[in-house]
Amino acid sequence: MDFSGFVVQLLNGLAGASSLFLVAAGLSLIFGVTRIVNFAHGSFFMLGIYVAYWLAERFGGAGFWVALPLAAIAVGVFGALVEMLLLRRIYHAPELFQLLATFALVLVIKDAALWLWGPEDLLGPRAPGFTGAVMILGRRFPTYDLLLIVVGPLVLGLLWLLLTRTRWGTLVRAATQDREMVSALGVNQAWLFTAVFTLGATLAGLGGALQLPREPANLGLDLVTIGNAFVVVVVGGMGSIPGAYVAALLIAEINAMCVGIGTVELFGIPFAFSKLTLVAEFLVMAVVLVVRPWGLMGRPQSVSRHAGPVEAPLRPAPRSWWMVGAVLIAALALLPLLTTQSPYLTVLAIDLLTAALFAASLHFIMGPAGMHSFGHAAYFGLGAYAAALLVRRFGVPMELSLLLAPLIAALGAWVFGWFCVRLSGVYLAMLTLAFAQIVWSIVFQWDDVTGGSNGLTGVWPAPWLAGKQAYYYLALVLVGAGVLMLRRMLHAPFGHAMRASRDSPMRSDAIGIDVKRVQWVAFIVAGLFAGLAGSLFAFSKGSISPDSLAVGRSVDGLVMVLLGGLQTLSGPLVGAVTFTWLQDTVARNTDYWRALLGGIVLLLVLVFPMGIAGFVQQRLQRAEVPR
């Protein structure tokens, strides 16, 4: 890449940073004031580009410039309705349940866009007056991209004026520091939250609308955008608008330079820098969080005052619950015999079992240990790929690979966990996501070993387990043993040390508990059992693909844990069975299964704010209290 190419790539990065900053600034504002990790923010970006396309088609010609602000305003109004009708009802729920509600909203919005605009990519018109290009050092550069370069700093300046030179901005900054005190001073907190959410959604919609001449509107923009926006917000510092702009510039420029450099030879080995664009932002985030845990321009998070009720100490289950468990195990043992006329039910039961173990392993670090993970799929996928590679490449017997694959996943958790346990809150969760995306990128691009995007096929169990009934019983035994071992550890001194480290790290350290070591060991244990779930999954399907490590798998695990109840030991099992069964049943009966599934999840969040198992446990405890 010569000097002129370097300059053009630098300008490309500046143009890309503007749209990324608009989305990240809105997300940062919303989180700073409401403390909601808004997973639906990428959907607002997607709606912005779709609405801009629809309006531009209706107005035509110079109407394009009217369509852009109208699309942003429309998305802002939609965001206000979401905040008032949905989120306002769950502000006092634990923060992770708010995340679950916004995830359900993503599903609903995606299918609404599918119904309104169809599945095809929609390419918008060129921007009137900015359809040409200018010559820069002998290279053509789009004039529209020059406009985008100006938009980013302009919006940053306007936001700075709004937040520092107006009374509303003063209230927003105060709420970012202590929203309860702002409410105590007589400020209408509800309307302040609505105004901030509306502004954030408007910025996301504007970011999407501005991208219309550069890329087509498609249904995959929501998850791609929210991933990039989260990275920018975390790298810049949660709640910092200038930090979001600096981080957007940094990440956009790194991606642009990777594309510009292309393939080069290092020590005689060809190295494709362009492939780093899949993971560059996550590498940056991992490095920044390890070196500066609060982001480039962020501050340590204040402690949430809505973390849910204090949990009672763990007690052994009463005899009646053991009897219920015995009946359940007996029913599971008889299930294949009772469903011989419907083999698919056995296949579904295997999926439910692997999902239950995956959810239980995630709950082990999220509930008792208090460490939120957005990248738990890394260990599920490591176990799956390790089992597949051991059988296919090294000829290891399937039985032995089931023992070795979880150990390889635990090794990955050992490495990543050492860094992750040094953080907390959203920053810890985002670092787990960064490591998961790094692993996914390696698997996705290492064609010679992992099969790349095609994955690996021919991963079948041993001949004596070829029948689905036999494999079901193996899965039942291993999953049952795994869940019981996790439960036993929670009732052991180690489990009490985990809970103590979560509830009061300083007191735990004062009485001699090595808090970081306890959390690190918990991370490794969770990775071990997630790897076991992944290896069982690989042999049950006969193949494995990079989707097993993707963000979607991690989100599924989060939904399972939260849907069942974070504060109960049975919660992840109930949530895994409920979510997996709903996903399978709904997907087979309607084309718009995401909207229906999202609607059901929203209903469950509103009705059972402590999760399904948590709600049942709460009712049983109230029934036991003598009147």
Image (spheres, rainbow, N blue to C red):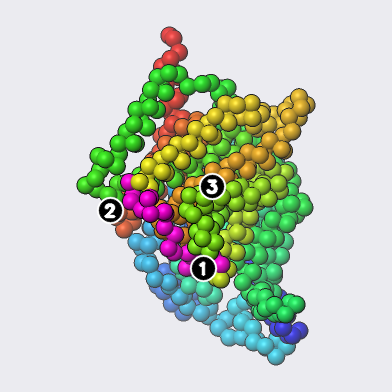
Mark 2 lies on a secondary structure that is: loop
Secondary structure found at label 3: helix
Rendered residue at 42%/44% (across/down): 475
Check disc 1 and give the amino acid type.
Gly
Which residue corresponds to the image point at 61% horizontal and 82% vertical from the top-left? 142
User: What residue is shown at x 72% (from left), y 38% (from top)?
Assistant: 516
Quarter of the image for residue 339 reads top left
How packed mark 1 is, by other alpha carbons closer than 10 Å (few <14, some 14-19, many 20 or more), is: some
Residue 512 in the image, given as x and y percentages of width and height: 76, 27
**Residue 479 pos. (x, y %):** 46, 40
Mark 3 neighbour density, 10 Å: few (under 14) some (14–19) many (20 or more): some
Frontmost of labels 2 and 1 is: 1
Mark 2 vs mark 1: which is more N-terminal?
1
Quadrant housing the N terminus: bottom right
Q: Which residue is denoted by mark 3 in the rendering?
A: 403
Q: Is residue 608 left or right of residue 239?
A: left
Horizontal side of 218 relative to 510 (left or right) equals left
**For mark 1, what is the residue?**
451
Residue marked by disc 2: 589
* Residue type, label 3: Leu
Q: Report the span colored magenta.
A: 449-469
Question: Gap between marks 3 and 2, in whole Å?
Answer: 38 Å
- The location of residue 406, given as percent across then percent down, is 56, 48
Q: Counting residues from the N terminus, which is met first, the one under dot 3 or under dot 2?
A: 3
In the depicted structure, whether residue 498 falls above or below residue 54 = above
